[in-house]
């Protein structure tokens, strides 16, 4: 079984559009949207949900106002400034509560409850390109590496059960917890970048994160014709660091037009960008063989 | 006043708008990049960085000679950052959220503090007049909220002390880091683009921020691309679209050279000056309300 994750560091470089095209081109795949904070892949893949489950992770502190004597010990111990006075009692601001249990353990009146935290929903779905696992984190929840790991685990189980050889993941932007979690057991990280200062800067950071976790890096330069100088810098970085330069894609509204039709760009009329993505996909298949 | 520039979807133009607003803002201002995982504002404002501070988190450091292996610390820890097995105690500093619970609960006073480097905070000045502050997460560090907390505390103290308005470049999404970035704001600017992805994530952001009751306004980037559902949504929810940046290749090229859009031509300069004026008016209305 092989696992590919499409990431970018910087948001909006084209991860999801490219993942959708790969999902169209691949065979025997499980599709996985690991951008649990702001998932978009479902907009192109139109999944029909087969199973839905609550994602419960950690706990949150809730002060029982009947028992609170307003001694203020909890607020003074909370490192997250999550507890504040509210009239005659204290109150926890759920957005800032990390679920560390310190207030619960030290409250002299045992006035603080610690219920499970329902952080989001996870889904198993069918799409025209095969099974898909995805999720939606609720607003304000900790951007969850745990949820990402759960989704990947479910994708692996599904692949095994149905004899599918490939797990194709759309990753999250950034370099934090969800991205780190998405790299575990990944054979290839496809980093989508663009020839802009932000694109180059964020590629450097996310690719060094991949190196840190010993994940092989392949790069796609989207909108390469926007700035030949930065495209040249990305080429040089790939050569120097040993990243595989997979493809240079032109700045083309075909991607947005396909998005408006709710299609992967490779499903629509023939275009230069669709041909480039096909070539990139063949190169990925070769890389996974080697 | 504090204005946060946010968006559900990444890459819609948060940093472009923040940099241009910073340049066009008519009052003394500081610009703060809270997208600590991938900070980019400095690439456009190009501040002379005069101070770089390492930001750390307090993690446990166990004095084994005092430890009685009572397990109270391990039972309290919600993050699997400390474990006791028989007559051995182990810490996993990279898992630690820095709550200080283990240190407080240890009956023997055996747990002191060590530190984990979260990243750095950089301060400098752009164009000789705009103080800039950036958090930069260490590559390999998983948690951005503790670094953001430190940057926000500095931001609040410094802006209050010097009487500065603040512009915040927020991280994408609507999870904890994005939400906490906008909690201090007097006005939230949502930057979106009229594409299906842009619209979907814009709605997520609006739903997430709406309960704060903070006034929100919209800047539409790449206007003319995609579809027009965002207009209907904004009209239906009373969200003012304060500026529209047209979808033009020369704008994308200007951005790709690391230049500030407000300084590209007169028209765009006026667009951002107008946006700044409208945001300041929104802040004032809110003060009086």
Image (cartoon, helix red, strand yellow):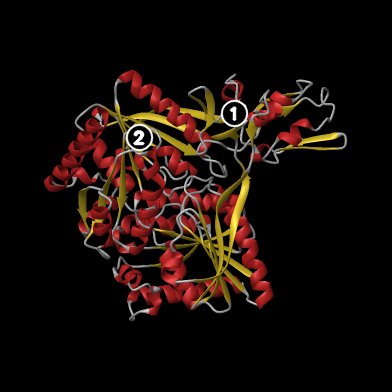
Q: In percent of the image, x 45 and y 31: which residue is there?
A: B151
Residue A101, by quadrant, is top right
The x, y position of residue A238, in whole percent, is 47, 58
In the rendered view, would you say B178 is above or below B70?
below
Pointer 2: what residue? B185
Q: Locate the N terminus of chain B and report the quarter of the image it occupies.
A: top left
> In the image shown, does A141 or B117 lie closer to the viewer?
A141
Residue ID at (37%, 67%): A249
Task: Pick whichever, B165 or A123, lies toward us.
Answer: A123
- Across and down, in percent, residue B246 comes to 20, 56
How crowded is the residue under tag 1: few (<14 C-alpha within 10 Å), some, or many (20+)?
few
Q: Nearer the viewer, residue A211 or B248?
A: B248
- Chain containing the residue with disc 1: A
Q: Nearer the viewer, mark 2 or mark 1?
A: 1
Q: Which residue is mark 1?
A: A66
Q: Residue at x 52, y 71 (%)?
A: A284
Asked whether the viewer can see residue B60, the reply is no
Q: Position of residue A262 (x, y in %)?
A: 37, 72
> Which part of the image, by quadrant, shows the C terminus of chain B?
top left
Residue B75 lies in quadrant: top right
Q: How many marks?
A: 2
Indicate the secondary structure of the residue bearing disc 1: loop
């Amino acid at each position: 079984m092989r696992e590919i994750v499409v990431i970018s560091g910087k948001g909006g470089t084209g991860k999801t559009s490219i993942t959708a095209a790969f999902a169209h081109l691949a065979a025997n795949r499980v599709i996985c949207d690991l951008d649990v904070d702001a998932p978009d892949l479902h907009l192109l893949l139109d999944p029909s949900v087969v199973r839905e489950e609550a994602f419960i992770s950690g706990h949150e502190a809730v002060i029982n106002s009947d028992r609170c004597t307003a001694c203020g010990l909890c607020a003074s111990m909370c490192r997250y400034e999550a507890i504040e006075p509210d009239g005659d009692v204290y109150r926890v601001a759920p957005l800032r509560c990390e679920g560390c249990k310190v207030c619960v353990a030290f409250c002299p009146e045992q006035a603080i409850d610690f219920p499970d935290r329902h952080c989001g929903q996870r889904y198993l779905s069918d799409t025209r390109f095969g099974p898909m696992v995805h999720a939606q984190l609720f607003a304000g929840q900790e951007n969850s590496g745990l949820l990402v790991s759960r989704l990947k685990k479910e994708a692996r189980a599904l692949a095994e059960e149905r004899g599918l050889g490939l797990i194709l993941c759309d990753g999250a932007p950034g370099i934090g917890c969800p991205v780190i979690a998405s790299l575990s057991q990944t054979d290839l990280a496809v980093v989508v970048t663009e020839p802009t200062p932000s694109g180059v800067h964020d590629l450097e950071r996310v690719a060094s994160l991949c190196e840190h976790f010993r994940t092989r890096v392949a790069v796609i330069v989207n909108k390469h014709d926007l700035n030949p100088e930065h495209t040249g810098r990305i080429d040089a970085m790939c050569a120097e660091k040993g990243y595989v330069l997979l493809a240079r894609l032109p700045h083309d509204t075909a991607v947005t037009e396909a998005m408006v039709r709710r299609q992967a760009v490779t499903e629509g009329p023939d275009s230069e960008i669709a041909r480039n993505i096909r070539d990139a996909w063949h190169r990925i298949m070769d890389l996974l063989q080697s | 006043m504090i204005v946060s520039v946010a968006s559900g979807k990444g890459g819609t133009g948060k940093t472009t708008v923040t940099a241009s607003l910073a340049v066009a803002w008519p009052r003394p201002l500081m610009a703060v990049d809270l997208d600590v995982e991938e900070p980019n504002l400095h690439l456009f404002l190009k501040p002379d960085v005069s101070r770089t501070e390492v930001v750390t988190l307090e993690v446990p450091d166990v004095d084994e000679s005092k430890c009685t292996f009572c397990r109270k610390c391990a039972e309290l820890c919600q993050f699997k950052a400390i474990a006791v097995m028989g007559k051995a105690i182990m810490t996993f500093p990279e898992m630690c959220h820095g709550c200080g619970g283990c240190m407080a609960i240890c009956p023997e006073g055996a747990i002191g503090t060590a530190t984990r480097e979260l990243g750095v905070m950089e301060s400098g000045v752009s164009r000789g007049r705009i103080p800039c502050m950036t958090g930069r997460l260490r590559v390999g560090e998983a948690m951005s909220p503790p670094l953001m907390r430190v940057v926000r505390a500095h931001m609040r103290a410094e802006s209050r002390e010097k009487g500065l308005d603040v512009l915040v470049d927020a991280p994408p999404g609507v999870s904890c880091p994005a939400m906490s970035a906008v909690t201090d704001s007097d006005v939230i600017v949502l930057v979106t683009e009229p594409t299906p992805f842009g619209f979907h994530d814009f709605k997520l952001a609006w739903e997430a921020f709406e309960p704060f009751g903070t006034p929100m306004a919209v800047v539409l980037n790449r206007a003319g691309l995609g579809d027009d559902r965002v207009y209907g949504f904004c009209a239906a929810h009373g969200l003012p679209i304060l500026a529209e940046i047209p979808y033009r290749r020369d704008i994308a090229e200007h951005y790709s050279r690391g230049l500030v859009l407000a300084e590209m031509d007169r028209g765009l300069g006026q667009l951002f000056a107008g946006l700044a004026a409208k945001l300041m008016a929104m802040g004032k209305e809110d003060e009086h309300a």
